[in-house]
Amino acid sequence: MNNTTISRIGTILYALVIGFFGVNHFLQGTGVQKQMPRFIPYSIFWVYLTGVLLIAAAIALLIGKYVRVAGLLLALFLILIVLTVHIPAMINGTGAEHVSIIVTNLVKDTGLAGAALIIAGRNSS
């Protein structure tokens, strides 16, 4: 299998994961809303908007259009989530079980941001 095929399979798998998270924003909207910082107004609106944007990014990656832009914007979004949601939650967290979940989400979103940058770097369309 050549590198192009391997990269495409990886991009498809990544897009399916991102699409899952986008759909999950609709299925678990109020649960996702509870994770948002209190300073963000109309939090449920932002939950659903980010769900739409995650699904749009997944579609772009799946069909191979605007892959670079989708990857860059997705990485930016995920890094913003790490900085505005996960790190403040870790600093303000209470209870070891919650800290474990927060750190897991922080590492997950950082890794997903890194993968989005790799995908963006390998695509010019």
Image (cartoon, rainbow, N blue to C red):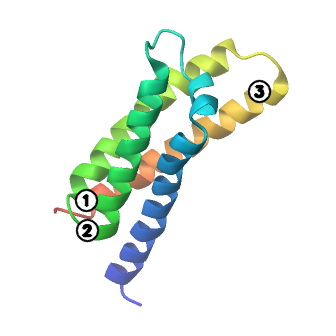
Percent across and percent down for residue 21 are 52, 49
- At a point 47% along the width and 47% down the height, the residue shown is 22
Identity, as a three-letter code, of the amino acid under mark 2: Gly
Q: Is residue 51 above or below residue 15?
A: above
Q: Nearer the viewer, residue 85 or 114?
A: 85
Around disc 1, counting alpha carbons within 10 Å, would you say few (fewer than 14), some (14 to 19), or many (20 or more)? many
Say which quarter of the image contains residue 31.
Answer: top right
Name the residue tied to disc 3: 98
Query: Residue flagged by tag 3: what amino acid is it?
Result: His
Which residue occupies the extreme bottom position in the image?
A: 1
In which quadrant of the rendered image does the N terminus lie?
A: bottom left
The secondary structure type at the circle numbered 1 is: helix
Residue 10 as seen in the image, left or right of residue 33:
left
Q: Which mark is residue 64?
A: 2
Task: Classify 25 as above or below 34.
Answer: below
Marks 2/3: CA–CA distance: 38 Å
Q: 47 left or right of 52? A: right
Residue 67, label in figure: 1
Considering only order in the chain, which callout, 3 or 1, is on the residue closer to the N terminus? 1
Disc 1 to disc 3, C-alpha distance: 35 Å
- Quadrant occupied by the C terminus: bottom left
Is the C-beta separation of discs 1 and 2 under 8 Å?
Answer: yes
Give the residue displayed 59% in from the left and 41% down from the top: 107
Q: Which mark is residue 90?
A: none
Give percent across and percent down for residue 59.
Answer: 33, 60
Classify mark 2: helix, strand or loop.
loop
Tell me the SS state at disc 3.
Answer: helix
